[in-house]
Image (cartoon, rainbow, N blue to C red):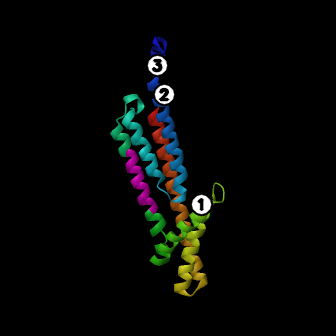
Amino acid sequence: MHYLKDLWHQIPWYDMARLSGLGAVFLAVGLGVMMVPLGLPGTWVIVVGGVLYSIFFQFDGGVTSAIKVNVVLVGLAVFGEIVEFGVGTLGSKPLNVSNGAIVCAFIGGIVGAIVGVPIFLIGSLIGLFIGAFLGALIYEWATLNNFGRAFVNAGAVLATRMVATFLKTTLAVGMGVYLIFKVF
């Protein structure tokens, strides 16, 4: 029995816990980056990963304060939301796209992402873009009674949605790289 007690105290619990924390950070970053193109709050998953890590461990071996790292991550996540809203929603306004088309594009994107789930790996992303395009196209065609103009407006909505998704995904990758560098 004495042997088991000594063996229990020889296990490097802190190292195992830190390795688990690093795994959780990598998981949060990976999930977060994959969630963003699907219109899900992936940047906030990265923030939660950083906050949870900072509760138990220090960043940069104690060189950087946890508050500073988490404030940077939260600031980048808020900035990403503002950019996504600004580009994705208001980016097509100069082409006189109606607010109803933007709302229908949003709803169509959600429906398309759900419908696209069975297609392996990229189905939701493709469904999101096609759904946004079709939502805007149907609304604009119904209100304008001009298929050509409705198609142009739906194309503008699709283009701005794609740019917003690209920008926010790039930001999520940057957040992930920042967080990973801070945990080592």
- Percent coordinates x, y for residue 104 in the rendering: 50, 74
Among numbered discs 2 and 3, the one appearing first in the sequence: 3
Give the residue drawn at x 66%, y 56%.
120
Q: Residues within 10 Å of mark 2 (few under 14, many from 20)?
A: few
Mark 3 element type: helix
Q: Mark 2 or 3, which is nearer the eye?
A: 3
Q: Amino acid at mark 2?
A: Met
Residue 153 location, quadrant: bottom right
Residue type indicated by callout 1:
Ser
Mark 1, residue position = 124
Q: Which residue position is annotated with label 2?
A: 16
Given residues 155 and 23, the one toward you in this image is 23
Identity of the residue drawn at 53% across and 80% down: 139
Q: Which residues are magenta?
A: 72-84
For label 3, the residue is 8
Q: Which is in the foreground here, disc 1 or disc 3?
A: 3
Q: Earlier in the sequence, mark 2 or mark 1?
A: 2
Q: Position of residue 39 (x, y in %)?
A: 51, 60
Residue 56's spot in the image, x, y percent? 38, 34
> Judging from the image, what secondary structure is the residue with disc 2 in?
helix
Residue 181 visible in rendering: yes
Majority secondary structure in the magenta region: helix
Q: Residue furthest right?
A: 119
- How many numbered marks appear? 3
Q: Please state if 108 lies on the left or on the right of 58 as rendered.
A: right
Q: Is residue 183 above or below residue 32?
A: above
Q: CA distance from mark 1 to mark 3?
A: 47 Å
Labels 1 and 3: the sequence-earlier one: 3
Compared with residue 20, is residue 89 higher up or lower down, i.e. above or below?
A: below
